[in-house]
Amino acid sequence: MVARTLSIYGRYFLQFLKARLSYRGDFIASVLSSIVVSISGLLFVLFLVDGEQVKSLKGWSQAEVLFIYGYSFLATALFSTVAPNLYGFGDRYVIQGQFDRVLLRPLSTLPQVLFDSFNLESFGNFAVGSTVIIYASSQLGITFSFVDVLWLLVSAFSGAVILLSVFVTLASMSFLFEDKLGISAPFFNLLNFGRYPIPIFNRAIQVLLSFVVPFGFVAFYPATHFFGRAEYRLYCYATPFVALLTALVAAFAWRFGVSRYSSTGN
Amino acid sequence: MTSAAVYIPFVRNAFLSMLAYRLRYYTGILTYFVFVAVHYFIWSAVFAGREPGAVINGFTLDEMITYVAVGWIARSMYFSDIDEEIDDIVRTGQIGVYLLRPVNFQHMMLSQAFGGMLFRGLFFSLPVAIPILLFFPVAPPASVASFVLFLFSMLIAFLVFAEINFLVGLLAFKLKSINGIVRAKYFLMQLLSGLLLPLTFFPNAFRVVLEWLPFQAMSYLPLQFYLGKLSGPEIVEALALQFGWILVLYLLGRYFLSRALYFLTLQGG
């Protein structure tokens, strides 16, 4: 049963890949664009904390800031491969009624929506993020043991799950309030906070990013594992549990949303 | 040459269509607030541990906060998205209808963007500005003259931004989707215009090149005016360069539009 479901989603992916690669110039333009996006964000950090005029952000060195920034790309890149399906979900699925199609198929609804299309370009971001992490690690003198690499993978995956859960929860709202754009845009921007050391922000924002919209767990907290800053240890290793918790909330919100869905009736 | 009055309905149209998306409006205001807040804390952290009034690359912390806040408020005004509109018009095939009209497509799109700006200036930038001005210590303009110059430079910023968008939009004639490029353009322009950080923070090689490019017309230049950082001859020089760019970008738009239309094939009716 599981094997069959997986093979169906495998076919979803292959189908998408065929369509995507048939426009090669288009695909290359998108990959380059996504690399430009991550590099321009990176240049901002690099020019701002240049190590000469500005040596640190409130005690966080250039290499540490870069490391966190690069770290944030891992989770966001994983998340972005399926994110476009959620952005504009309300318009396409609820208002235009495409959700009917989803409900008619004998598969779970959420994976069908998530795997409807894939944003392969985000692997450009993943590559940029990895490069930055390697560079910053050499500056900081960090060496990666087996456990470290494992933590990197687990926390990146957890970060992606947190992002996915937040945006699935937001997309679920589209079932209740029909609006073309939904409310995810400001949350996407809130994510910008999560790319920096959280302690540079004021108390209210720290609480917001730790307990309400837990973007602090997307990069900053798990990255402190590599800095030997013991004061964040508890938060750092809570990352996978936060992911689990947000996933539960998202699953509940989604179920509730689907139960409220009424077709456009065309 | 058609008379300018022909384009007034397009201005009005853009104005009305913005009213239609209520939620986008509110989330837009929130979005700008979040942007300013993030950068407020980043700059505070940059200046942390220095004595008050310390200068980094020509800016004090107070100036930087004003720079960031006014910069984002200004962006809320000169912003336009005709690239995405052109993409939509080309993809849905409406382009055929547009071309049948006895108006210049480039002028029409620019007027539409202008209508958007008038709307934004009145009904969006103001609500964006109020919470930002309440929460963050934003200084008033350096003088009346610098404020007038700032407002005038908003018009330049609008034209440069819209003309670049028009050029990006023309890519829709060639590519299946320009979404990725549009996104990359936003991020690149935020950096190159000096919105994220003043050009004085860039390494020298970057800075020299950027000083000759049109991007600074959107943020760095208007904010230099606002903060009263430029002297007479520098002002004239900067304005002359940007007028030159407005013309060059306009002609580029005209040239690439004619090429795009020459190769355009429309399917059926």
Image (spheres, grey):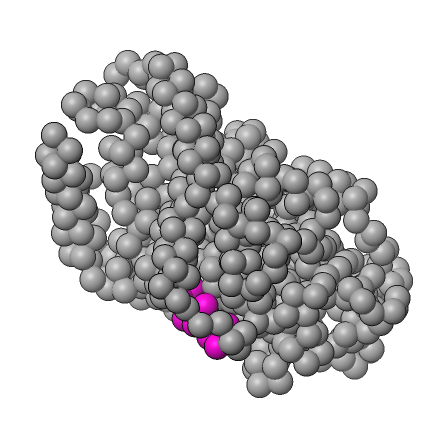
Residue under the point 26% across and 60% down: A27
The percent coordinates of residue B230 (x first, y second) are 80, 75
Q: Is residue A67 above or below residue A5?
A: below
| Residue B207 vs residue B135, the one in the foreground | B135
Residue under the point 38% across and 27% down: A251
Q: Does A58 lie within the magenta span?
A: no
The percent coordinates of residue B173 (x first, y second) are 30, 57
Residue A97 relative to residue B224: left or right? left
**Quadrant of the image occupied by residue B44:** bottom right
**Quadrant of the image occupied by residue B211:** bottom right
Which quadrant would the C terminus of chain B be assigned to in this image? top left
Q: Does A135 lie within the magenta span?
A: yes
Residue A241 relative to residue A63: left or right? left
**Quadrant of the image occupied by residue A207:** top right
Residue under the point 76% across and 41% down: B130
For the record, the magenta segment spans A128-138
Q: Is residue A122 above or below residue A32?
A: above
| Residue B110 vs residue A89, the one in the foreground | A89
Residue A56 relative to residue A87: left or right? right
| Residue A65 vs residue A186, the one in the foreground | A65
Residue under the point 81% across and 42% down: B134
The percent coordinates of residue A223 (x first, y second) are 51, 58
